[in-house]
Image (cartoon, rainbow, N blue to C red):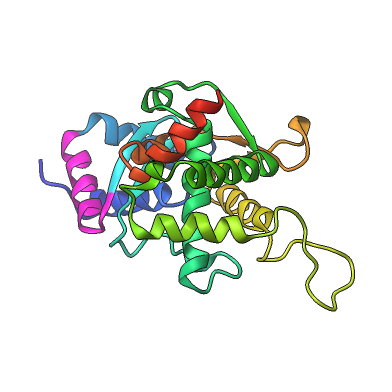
Amino acid sequence: MTLSQRDLADVGVLIGCGLRPKWRPAADSDYRTLLGRYRTDTEFRGAVDSVLEGLEVQVLSESDLGLVLGVRRESVFAFRLTDLPNVTGVSDRLLVGLVSVAVAAFAFPTPADFDDDRVRWVSVDEIERFVRDVCEQVKRNPDLASRQEESFEEAWRTFDRLSPGYKADKGRGKARRSPASSTYWVASVLGWMVDQGLARPDASRGPEAFQLLERFRIQARELAGNATYAVLAAVRGDES
């Protein structure tokens, strides 16, 4: 069977749904129907996968969550770290990258954990303390980072120099977080994860606590072979 113009339009609709991380098939009948077709119609599935390949995107999962997509760095849909507030220079981008990997390593310290669908929670304070502990471990044992890229060295040293708590911007009165605070960067990354449908706030677990969602587990699994993840996961394993 040759796909019709209507079929090709449906390919675009399904991809559009997958690129909206908070959309769920349960709440959208068109999405639910097209996801079912993706699972059962080989020709339709092939068309969707081919278009995604051209966009440097791949399907990581096709669960009831919908299409969970992984975007390669070269893709036009790749998230830009500069989209976060106050991310303007190389050091800022390295901080965001370090914190993002730290959330994955804290919640999933072994590759096998990515196959465990138990609910996991993190908080701003937990992740801040964890990354700071990583900095201390690397200072005490430089071999931990000896095979890392130079960017990792710059990232952890930059984080280590930050104030661990609140820091007032000069002339602004009441103390509040600023980019000179390590908790600012952790809170920014976790807030972005909420916007991306990867986490949600959970006040019942304490202040600035977040539940990590299934979508995050699926996407974070791609980090299992990452060298920075390996270092952070090793530190996390020593803590457990």
Q: Nearer the viewer, residue 218 or 240?
A: 240
Q: Residue at image x 34%, y 40%?
A: 222
Say if residue 87 shows up in the picture: yes
Residue 203, picture quadrant: top right
Q: Residue furthest left?
A: 1
Q: Is residue 203 left or right of residue 213?
A: right
Quadrant location of the C terminus in the rendered image: top right
Say if residue 22 shows up in the picture: no
Quadrant location of the N terminus in the rendered image: top left
Query: Majority secondary structure of the magenta segment?
Result: helix
Q: Residue furthest right?
A: 173
Q: Nearer the viewer, residue 114 or 135?
A: 135
Q: Nearer the viewer, residue 21 or 134?
A: 134
Q: Is residue 148 left or right of residue 129?
A: left
Expressed as whole percent of the image width and height from the top left, the position of residue 37 reads 29, 34
Is residue 175 a member of the stretch shown in magenta? no
Q: Residue at image x 33%, y 43%?
A: 226
Q: Eyeballing the image, is 57 above or below 85? A: above
Expressed as whole percent of the image width and height from the top left, the position of residue 2 reads 11, 46
Q: Residue furthest front?
A: 140
Q: Nearer the viewer, residue 145 or 18?
A: 145
Q: Residue at image x 80%, y 62%?
A: 176
Q: Is residue 76 left or right of residue 155?
A: left
Residue bounds of the magenta highlight: 42-57
Expressed as whole percent of the image width and height from the top left, the position of residue 58 reads 28, 46
Expressed as whole percent of the image width and height from the top left, the position of residue 95 reads 52, 58
Q: How many marks?
A: 0
